[in-house]
Amino acid sequence: MTRYRAPALARGIEVLRVLEQAGALSLDALAKRVAAPKSSLLRILGTLAALRLVERDDARKTYRATAVILPMDRRAQHLRRAVAEALRRLAAKSGHTAEWYLPAQRGMVLVERAEPPDREVRVAARLGFVRPWHGELEAVSCLAAGRFPPKQGFGGWRTCGETGSMQRESAAQARQRIAAGLERGYVRDDPYNANGVRRMAAAVLKGETLIGILAIAENFRPDAERARPANLRALRGEAKKLCESECTLVKRQHSGASAGRGALD
């Protein structure tokens, strides 16, 4: 058994990973999976909840992760720097929150965001927020569904109506919207959700593989409609730069590997 210098930290990370993979679990079920005393787990869960990484359902007496842990290799670190710069530019140009989502086991995870300078924004989604693979068909999940077709099929999606309330989307409507987003590479929401936010999102690809999704979370403003075309152009431009950056990095790595093999030969 691995011995850690900070066992409490290791156990907290294990709890978060188990909840991320399993979904909602009761304390009893979690104790069986982690093999730890319930008293210790309660302290860990309380700390994770205070950090907004876990939330408790009082009615069902279960816990679920609201954030995930994603390992980063050298390429991911390079991409993250490029993404951070893109987000800063997008937030400054649009005057709205810019977001970056990565695919994970449970859905698309918000891992990075940038706020516009000198302007108050109100976006509820925090870092670690997970947009499930199937549920609300908004801009980010719509783009993701085009690359990762839902196992449940295309029925059962919900969309935001004109009044901000959720309504059922037919399988045909969902399939059509997802196909259109897949073809264009971007999706725009028109109605604002109950939090007064709507998103436009663009896919960042390496070949045909989805690397991540870049999004602008628009708050309601009097000039919102007039500014949308410019915001969309900025979003698509930054997504294109990230695609090119990723492709360039892959080529450099391949060239370096070939040169290394040549030297060894």
Image (tube, grey):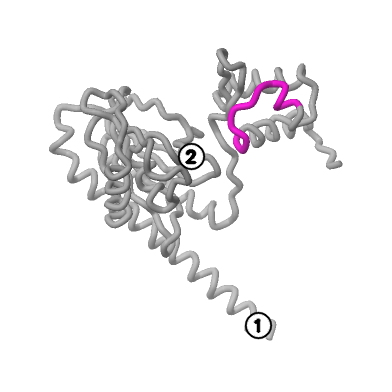
Residue 60: % across, % down: 58, 17
For this view, does 223 lie left or right of residue 193? left
Residue occupying the point 43% across, 39% down: 134
Residue 87: % across, % down: 37, 43
Query: What is the crowding at mark 1: few (fewer than 14 residues within 10 Å), some, or many (at least 20)?
Result: few
Pick the quarter of the image with the N terminus: top right
Kind of residue at badge 2: Val
* Residue to which mark 1 is pinned: 263
Whether 59 is drawn above or below 68: the answer is above
Q: Of circles 2 and 1, which is in front? A: 2
Q: Quadrant of residue 124?
A: top left
Query: What's the distance in space between the residues labelled 2 and 1, CA to CA?
Result: 41 Å
Residue occupying the point 54% across, 57% down: 75
For this view, does 232 lie left or right of residue 3? left
Pick the quarter of the image with the C terminus: bottom right
Q: Is 129 one of the magenta-colored residues?
A: no
Q: Is residue 254 visible?
A: yes
Between discs 2 and 1, the one toward the N terminus: 2
From which residue to which does the magenta span run? 20-31
Which mark is on residue 109?
2
For this view, does 227 lie left or right of residue 117? left
- Element under label 1? helix
Whether 252 is drawn above or below 203: the answer is below
